[in-house]
Image: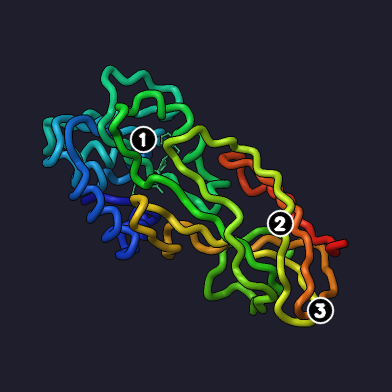
Amino acid sequence: MKITSYQQNLLSDSERLTAFHQVISEKSKGIIYDLGTGSGVLSSWAAPLSRFVYAVEKDPLTAQIAQKNLSQFKNVSLMVNDAKSIFFPEKADIIICEMMDTALIDEDQVPVINSVREYLKKDGDIIPCGVFNGVEAVNTNINHPCYQEEETPHTELMSKLIIYDKIDFKKYIEPEIDYDIIIPVKNEGTVSAIKITTFTLLTPDFICGPTPMMNPPLLIPTNHLKVKGGENIILKLKYIMGGGLDTIRASFEAFS
Ligand SMILES: C[S@@+](CC[C@H](N)C(=O)[O-])C[C@H]1O[C@@H](n2cnc3c(N)ncnc32)[C@H](O)[C@@H]1O
């Protein structure tokens, strides 16, 4: 396959690929949409097991690569367009959509799924089918949202992980998040950021990740608040799914 370095990284993430390969092999049938097809790898697994695949990629250069990689399959049509604005001529048995990003903030997953869900057959499935989002209070030295990597400054965990959202892609998703979340603090010290962790549901029974290229943990700076072990604090958290990292607002308040 011919690929860019970004796609090379996506294709080197064996946990991500193994999970998708397993579910696509089990579920593929009939009419499939592969939205955000990228290199075309997921379509190439679905095509031999289905009647027809509509592969959609909005980036023209990426689409050229996908076109080459998928040319051997006579039952794949590549559409170079934004998946939100496509008219599909037939409904889908399976919608594959891998435009994942931590908490679904910085990619088009939610707007795309909200717009194509009407094309899913009644007994159809979406892969992945949803996410769980969790948050922890942390103390770390960052001044802008960043994904946690080896070079990220030391991060002290100040609370347990609280699952604050469960999103089912088969139901309408309200893109604007505005939550007050109670966080039980573990240690005495300062909280200065949050860490969001997203777990991907490939199927309702198959939770995957985070993996290096699918939803790596996201660190977001907050105000600094001195805390005691055992106390509760309030996290005020806002963002828009599909709106980008600039839409995030996160701050801590004492619980009264
Ligand atoms: C994370 S990559 C995944 C690529 C491939 N599905 C895979 O698993 O290797 C997401 C792809 O979706 C494409 N994309 C993002 N938003 C899109 C949209 N609104 N419509 C169509 N493609 C989109 C990007 O250009 C990118 O190629």
Q: Nearer the viewer, mark 1 or mark 2?
A: 2
Residue 228: image tag: 3
Earlier-in-chain disc, 3 versus 1: 1
Circle 2: residue type: Ile
User: Can you say whether 51 is above or below 190 in the image?
Assistant: above
Is disc 1's CB within 8 Å of ligand 1? yes
Q: From mark 1 to mark 2, how far is it between C-alphas?
A: 37 Å
| The C terminus: image quadrant | bottom right
Circle 3: residue type: Lys
Residue 57: image tag: 1
Q: Looking at this view, name the residue that lies furthest to the right.
A: 256
- Neighbour tally class for label 2: few under 14, some 14-19, many 20 plus, Cα within 10 Å: some
Q: Residue drawn 68% across and 64% down? A: 194
What percent of the width, then of the height, locates residue 245? 63, 49
User: Can you say whether 249 is above or below 176 in the image?
Assistant: below
What percent of the width, then of the height, locates residue 102? 53, 54
Query: Element under label 3?
Result: loop
The residue that label 2 is drawn on is 181
Q: Residue drawn 29% across and 53% down? A: 20
Q: Residue drawn 50% across and 38% down? A: 110
Of 8 and 52, nearer the camera is 52
- Neighbour tally class for label 1: few under 14, some 14-19, many 20 plus, Cα within 10 Å: many
